[in-house]
Amino acid sequence: MTIANLNIVPFVSVENMMKLVLDIGVDRFLTDLAVYIEEDFRRWELFDKTPRVASHSHDGVIELMPTSDGQLYGFKYVNGHPKNMREGRQTVTAFGVLADVGSGYPMLLTEMTILTALRTAATSAVAAKYLAPKGSDTMAIIGNGAQSEFQAIAFKALLGVNKLRLYDINISASRKCASNLKGLGFDIAICTSGQEAVEGAHIITTVTADKQYATILTDNMVGTGVHINAVGGDCPGKTELHRDILLRSKIVVEYPPQTRIEGEIQQLAADYPVVELWQVMTGKVAGRHDPSEITLFDSVGFAIEDFSALRYVRDQLLHTKRFDELDLLADPDEPRDLFGMLLRQAAKDAA
């Protein structure tokens, strides 16, 4: 990345993000991003960690997700407004910043609506690599909205999953998902119920959008030996799984203080034992113990995953022009003379 003025910040717009992803290829983007996520989770203890700062309203939530590894600082602004879909808007939108801790200067500003979908899918597949039954090739996806295709492609790229069983209460969403994935090497079945979708599935992904306590999976739908990738329950008052499923499962989470507020485990006691994903990745705790075990990744999304995504995009910009140069930082020739910048600009405008 060559920017002549160090005070210019590279900005990745939605258009440039799409072009960057297509330049690299969706499969490779996901597999490369998964490497960055694993790298950062393996050095988990270096990071500042805090539950995201959330402002809740009747209609949704706006959140800030910050973290730092001591050298770089990253944050994401993200919203979650399920009603937006009815108005033709995205349920989730986001942007993010990566900055240098030493100077405090931002190094990258980027859209993160598309990038969040990619990092969520990559994180799901990384977790499943440690938790899903060996040889898994069939996944049920319940909820076929904006996240579904990314999840499918990530699981195929990282785990070899090539059979999909789709279900959504709106069949047009399932048809959309199937159409978008056509020609990508999947054997796809559109199902008429959640029960039908989970039949024969090694992995069950729930990724619905409604902000409510819901029971997308009931206890009788989940047999032994499956891995559940619970993505949709990501804020207080929003769940997808019956509580009895949790009691039968080995539960793996990103960051317990956040997941206990927002994840499926908000249904359980505050001291209910869970395993942290970084512990599994580093071998401190075993992933799947035996073929009959039910594993559950209670995914709510955590700032370190966004940090990984920001790092990855920054590194890709070293080899591409898929960014704009944003004049974001006021930096006068004499650092103490900020007002003088205004005077010089006035003189320039008057000339």
Image: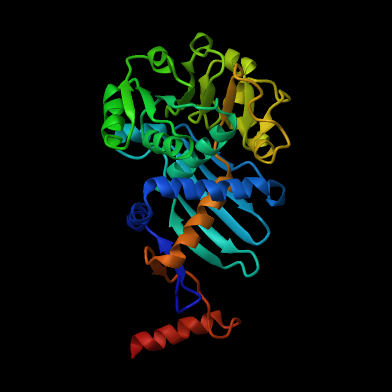
Would residue 176 appear left or right of 339 to someone viewing this image? left
> Looking at the image, how many numbered discs can be counted on the residues?
0
Asked whether residue 58 is in view, the answer is: yes
127 shown above or below 119? above
Asked whether residue 299 is in view, the answer is: no
From the top left corner, tell me how far across and down residue 94 is, in percent.
44, 48
Would residue 37 appear left or right of 176 to someone viewing this image? right
From the top left corner, tell me how far across and down residue 345 is, in percent.
42, 83
334 shown above or below 227? below
326 shown above or below 82? below
Q: Which of 307 and 165 is in front in this view?
A: 165
From the top left corner, tell me how far across and down residue 135 is, in percent.
50, 27
At horizontal 42% and vertical 63% (from top left) the residue drawn is 11
At horizontal 40% and vertical 38% (from top left) the residue drawn is 153
Would residue 193 appear left or right of 131 to someone viewing this image? left
Q: In which quarter of the image is residue 101?
A: bottom right
Outermost residue, top side: 220
Q: Nearer the viewer, residue 284 or 67?
A: 284
From the top left corner, tell me how far across and down residue 247 is, in percent.
64, 16
Would residue 205 appear left or right of 351 to someone viewing this image? right
Outermost residue, bottom side: 351
Q: Nearer the viewer, residue 154 or 251?
A: 154
User: For the C terminus, which image quadrant?
Assistant: bottom left
User: For the N terminus, which image quadrant?
Assistant: bottom left
Q: In which quarter of the image is residue 145?
A: top left
At horizontal 53% and vertical 81% (from top left) the residue drawn is 332
